[in-house]
Amino acid sequence: MKPIRYRVLLAEQLSAADKLTVAAKVSTMYSGPEAKSNSYQKAPDHSLVNDNWQFEVLDRLGRVVTIKYRGAEVATFIKRQVTEVELLPGDPIPEGVIKDPLDVWVRVDLLGVSARQIGSRVGKQKKSIEEELRLSQRHVEIQAALLQGLETDIFNLKKDFEKKDAQIAKLKAAAKAKPSLGEREKSSAPDNFALPKPVPVPVAKGGR
């Protein structure tokens, strides 16, 4: 049975402790010369320093260099192209002016995920954010529809109350205009109405 072969990243074979050491030291390097000064070499007192660190130039011009830890590339430094621009009076200041020589260099950390993996993660995060945004918009639309319905109900109820108030006002006005029972009796009797005079009862003369 043939053994199974895998292609693995050499830097990923470092231990967790070694990766922490690499990350801490590489974070302090900003240029190729700094990477070189932190690599394995002889100190002025002829002692060897920076054991396990190696420095390598990857191109003939020395613009691309890498630093290794125990033989594994952990960071690459690239010196970007620089040109000089002479300005005439009144010309605007150009973009990308180098204020610090270290700004010419860029560092690429080689520990971690690849550009494709980063792009994939970004794509997934983008889709997730888009889905959350879509759901949020749908939620807002539903809430707006509910609010509009409530406003319509409130408006209709207000109209009903106004109609009821108008009807009550009419009933009160009609009740005030309607005469009372006593006033109705007075108004129904004729003005020349008089009680009849009492008729005298004759008394018989003599008696038994």
Image (spheres, rainbow, N blue to C red):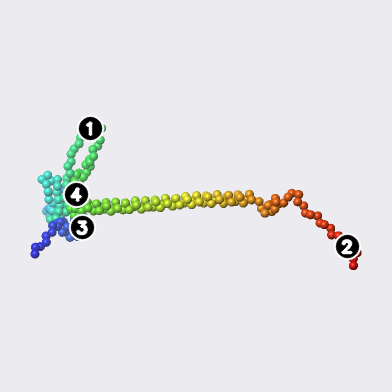
Tell me the number on the disc at residue 204. Answer: 2
* Residue type at tag 4: Arg
Q: Any mark on residue 107, and which?
A: 4
Between marks 3 and 2, how big is the CA–CA gap?
149 Å
What amino acid is labelled 3 in the image?
Answer: Leu
Reading the image, the residue beneath label 3 is 20
Q: Residue at x 72, y 51 (%)?
A: 189
Q: Earlier in the sequence, mark 3 or mark 2?
A: 3
Mark 1 or 3, nearer chain start: 3
Q: Which mark is residue 8?
A: none
The residue nearer to you, when weighing 119 against 205, is 205
Where residue 12 sits, quadrant-wise, is bottom left
* Residue at the image point whose x is 17% and y is 44% from the top: 80
N-terminal label among 2 and 4: 4
> Mark 4 falls on what kind of element?
strand
> Residue under circle 1?
88
Residue 4 percent coordinates (x, y): 11, 61
For mark 3, give the secondary structure.
Answer: helix
Measured as percent of width and height from the top left, residue 40 is found at 13, 54
- Decide: marks 1, 4 in contact (CB < 8 A)? no
The mark that comes first in sequence, 1 or 4, is 1
